[in-house]
Image: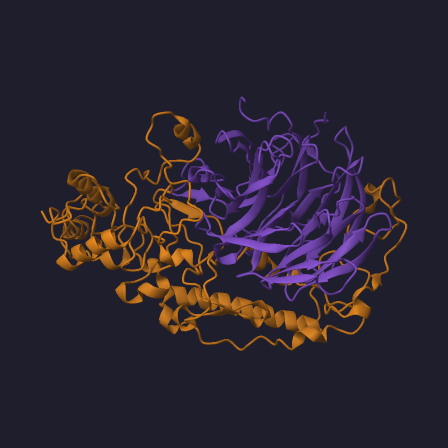
């Protein structure tokens, strides 16, 4: 029993760094989370045990321990409870425990579905394949992948199993005297304490865009290079076992993705009276070319990001040709360019005047694409 | 109050359908402010147009006017006097639509599509706030072509809300920045996100007693809303809750949908969320309970709004791109539904 070490810390799971009050529970956890056969749900006792079971019974090779951290996924390692943990890992864990400051940022209201699976991608590289390469059928780790050395020191004891559903949670939550299911839900807004997930905290702290080489930069619209925030998660991936986020994989807003679609590109400026019913395929004008450049840059960036996420960070940022920034001022002479140049800017766009609101009569042609008769 | 005109699977909640809805997905929707006696609804759409309807007490909607821009509309906002509507577009401009004259005039510009626009009415100034994917936040005197003030955002703006004297902007990369508008706009503080997924919508709420803005609700693509106070008296005041997720698991997976919009009820202080899953829900954040959830529609709900006295809840139905362009069916009709909601949103027993 390696656990009766000096500080006698709580038993913890080597695979996911979660802590437990009792080693018995830890063993149960390991059997359920890490040593369970994904095919027949039989619970084995160790990683190698699981591997042998799958090979012999199902003829399937398992190369990683399910739900494990990326660097702890070795199926060969024999761990049972606290037994078998490499001494250096024990030390590291101790260090984390003591040094890590107030550890439990109690954010873990979320069950298994938690932490983006990707933040570590940029950093963890040497430690093992990213989430995308997790064997089919094996669910991503409950914690997501966390850069080494910044493990969540205190996993909440009462993490709900991930399959527990939301709908009823309010009721549970309200039940008096119950151990809070959502201890976590409240997030200290301005706790100065060290963030448990340093990677996350950068998000809002306006991390200066230093170290850009690390996780790559992605040229965005208007050619700016986005600072590679450590947590920039290029993908929206459902993390929890058994859940799927209905969103395109790219971590970009639906609107941005949609706006790339050729159908939605802004029309060239000069076109005055908008007669388009269905926004037509626009003939490239100067401004259009510019837009296109942006678009393709964005798309390329996205692709690249994605590709990079699939592979490893290393080969990420081949700097894309800066989108033709020159394009902007081009904005065709007539009518308001997008440049805030005084004289043109305030040009009024001549529209049918006089069709006013309350009870105003709609002149024909105001609503070209729309079925007129209905407008009275 | 309303005629029940509905029926059919596209309207399982039997709500009142707004006449002559947009040709494409609704991307923005606002009711007129209390300064106008009638109730008007404006909605911006991906079809590059903004439409205005008058909503009669019977629930009948009368299309009044429409204006177009050069790109899809991303946001709309009313001037506080109800005479004008601002429209933000992917064409990188915001235009002011003078409803009485039915004329538009450009009032703001960015280097990238403009994601949000909000009218700010302060005692000592008024201005238009715009936030864009060019990572800037700008404040405009609508008579000038240069912004009064430009502030940098860490990332592209994904959502914003204004309730004087507070403004909040949510960005890509899970950024949140608070602004104070008192005197003049100024950054107040950047807040660490309570959510772990992409921000999608944000709405400011007021304190029950003081009626002053005191926090915000933030929705993410991961079917979750965070209730966050600016200065929580107790850190436990902040919490998150799940919503817009499939009830059961289909094929071993639970589907988690984006929260597309959040709106607070103007008098009750309760809130409504709409999601990609095709449902809306009403919540009481103080009692931490769900007040109501709707029937599922066959398309996502993209936007929602309450009218100024909280009698009418409007929600827009249309494809939101959450399953990618492949799932876009241009022939599918888009809807806006209206629903009497005052009682449904009453807070739990107080």
Compared across the picture, whether A149 is left or right of A376 comes to: left
> In the figure, B136 relative to A359: above or below?
below
Picture quarter with the C terminus of chain B: top right
Q: Nearer the viewer, residue B29 or B135?
A: B135
Q: Where is residue A3 in the image (x, y as percent from the top left)?
A: 13, 47
Q: In this view, does B217 lie to the left or right of B66?
A: left
Report if residue A32 is visible in the image: yes
Q: Where is residue A165 in the image (x, y as percent from the top left)?
A: 40, 35
Return the residue nearer the eye: B112 or B211. B211
Against A322, is A186 above or below?
Answer: above
Q: Which residue is drawn at 64% across and 31% down?
A: B267
User: Judging from the image, what is the letter of the chain drawn in purple?
Assistant: B
Residue B45 visible in this rendered orientation of the protein: no
Where residue A335 appears, as percent x and y from the top left, is 80, 68
Q: In which quarter of the image is the N terminus of chain B?
A: top right
Q: How far across and down, in percent of the image, does residue A292 sit? A: 62, 70
Q: Which residue is drawn at 41% across and 56% down?
A: A201
> Going by the image, does B198 lie left or right of A346?
left
Residue found 59% across the figure and 43% down from its top: B204
What tint does the image give chain A? orange
| Quadrant of residue B151 within the rendered picture | bottom right
């Amino acid at each position: 029993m390696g656990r009766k070490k000096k500080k006698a810390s709580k038993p913890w799971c080597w695979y996911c760094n979660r802590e437990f009050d009792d080693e018995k529970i830890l063993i149960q956890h390991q059997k359920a989370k890490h040593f369970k056969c994904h095919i027949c749900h039989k619970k084995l006792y160790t990683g190698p045990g699981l591997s042998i079971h799958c090979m012999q019974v199902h003829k399937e090779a398992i190369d990683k321990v399910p739900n494990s951290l990326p660097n702890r996924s070795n199926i060969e390692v024999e761990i049972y409870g606290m037994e078998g943990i490499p001494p250096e890992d024990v030390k590291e864990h101790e260090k984390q425990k003591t040094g890590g400051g107030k550890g439990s940022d109690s954010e873990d209201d979320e069950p298994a579905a938690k932490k983006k699976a990707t933040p570590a991608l940029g950093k963890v590289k040497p430690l093992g394949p990213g989430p995308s390469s997790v064997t089919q059928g094996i669910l991503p780790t409950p914690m997501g992948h966390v850069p080494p050395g910044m493990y969540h020191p205190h996993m909440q004891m009462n993490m709900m199993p991930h399959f527990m559903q939301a709908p009823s949670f309010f009721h549970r939550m309200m039940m008096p005297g119950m151990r809070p299911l959502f201890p976590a839900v409240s997030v200290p807004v301005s706790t100065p304490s060290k963030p448990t997930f340093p990677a996350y905290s950068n998000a809002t702290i306006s991390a200066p865009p230093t170290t850009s080489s690390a996780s790559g930069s992605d040229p965005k619209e208007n050619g700016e290079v986005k600072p590679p925030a450590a947590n920039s998660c290029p993908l929206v991936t459902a993390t929890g076992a058994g859940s799927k986020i209905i969103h395109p994989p790219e971590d970009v807003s639906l609107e941005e993705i949609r706006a790339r679609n050729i159908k939605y590109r802004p029309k060239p400026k000069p076109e005055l009276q908008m007669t388009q019913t269905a926004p037509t395929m626009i003939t490239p004008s100067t401004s259009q070319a510019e837009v296109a450049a942006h678009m393709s840059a964005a798309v390329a960036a996205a692709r690249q990001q994605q590709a990079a996420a699939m592979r490893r960070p290393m080969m990420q940022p081949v700097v894309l040709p800066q989108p033709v920034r020159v394009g902007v001022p081009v904005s065709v002479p007539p009518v308001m360019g997008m440049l805030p140049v005084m004289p043109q800017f305030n040009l009024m766009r001549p529209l049918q005047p006089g069709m006013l609101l309350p009870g105003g009569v709609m002149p024909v042609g105001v609503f070209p694409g729309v079925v007129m008769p209905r407008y009275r | 109050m309303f005629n029940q005109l509905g029926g059919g699977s596209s309207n399982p909640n039997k709500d009142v359908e707004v006449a002559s809805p947009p040709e494409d997905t609704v991307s923005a929707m606002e009711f007129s402010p209390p300064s106008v006696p009638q109730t008007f609804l404006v909605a911006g759409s991906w079809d590059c147009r903004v439409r205005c309807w008058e909503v009669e007490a019977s629930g009948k909607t009368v299309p009044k006017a429409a204006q177009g821009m050069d790109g899809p509309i991303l946001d709309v906002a009313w001037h506080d006097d109800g005479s004008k509507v601002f429209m933000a577009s992917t064409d990188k401009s915001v235009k002011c639509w003078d409803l009485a004259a039915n004329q538009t005039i450009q009032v703001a510009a960015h280097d990238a599509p403009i994601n949000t626009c909000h009218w700010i009415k302060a005692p000592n100034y008024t201005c238009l706030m715009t936030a864009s994917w060019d990572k800037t936040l700008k404040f405009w005197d609508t008579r000038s072509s240069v912004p009064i003030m430009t502030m940098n955002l860490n990332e592209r703006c994904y959502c914003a809300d204004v309730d004087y004297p507070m403004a909040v902007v949510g960005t890509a990369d899970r950024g949140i920045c608070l602004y104070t508008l008192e005197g003049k706009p100024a950054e107040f503080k950047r807040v660490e996100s309570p959510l772990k997924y992409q921000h999608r919508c944000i709405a400011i709420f007021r304190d029950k007693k003081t009626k002053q803005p005191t926090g915000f609700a933030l929705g993410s693509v991961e079917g979750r809303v965070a209730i966050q106070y600016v200065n929580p008296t107790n850190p436990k005041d902040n919490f998150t809750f799940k919503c817009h997720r499939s009830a059961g698991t289909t094929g071993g997976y639970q589907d988690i949908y984006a929260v597309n919009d959040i709106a607070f009820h103007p008098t009750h202080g309760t809130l409504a969320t709409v999601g990609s899953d095709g449902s809306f829900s009403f919540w009481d954040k103080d009692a931490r309970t769900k007040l109501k959830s709707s029937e599922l529609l066959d398309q996502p709900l993209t936007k929602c709004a309450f009218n100024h006295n909280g009698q009418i809840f409007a929600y827009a139905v249309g494809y939101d791109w959450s399953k990618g362009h492949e799932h876009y069916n241009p022939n599918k009709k888009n809807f806006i539904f209206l629903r009497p909601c005052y009682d449904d949103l009453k807070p739990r027993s107080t």
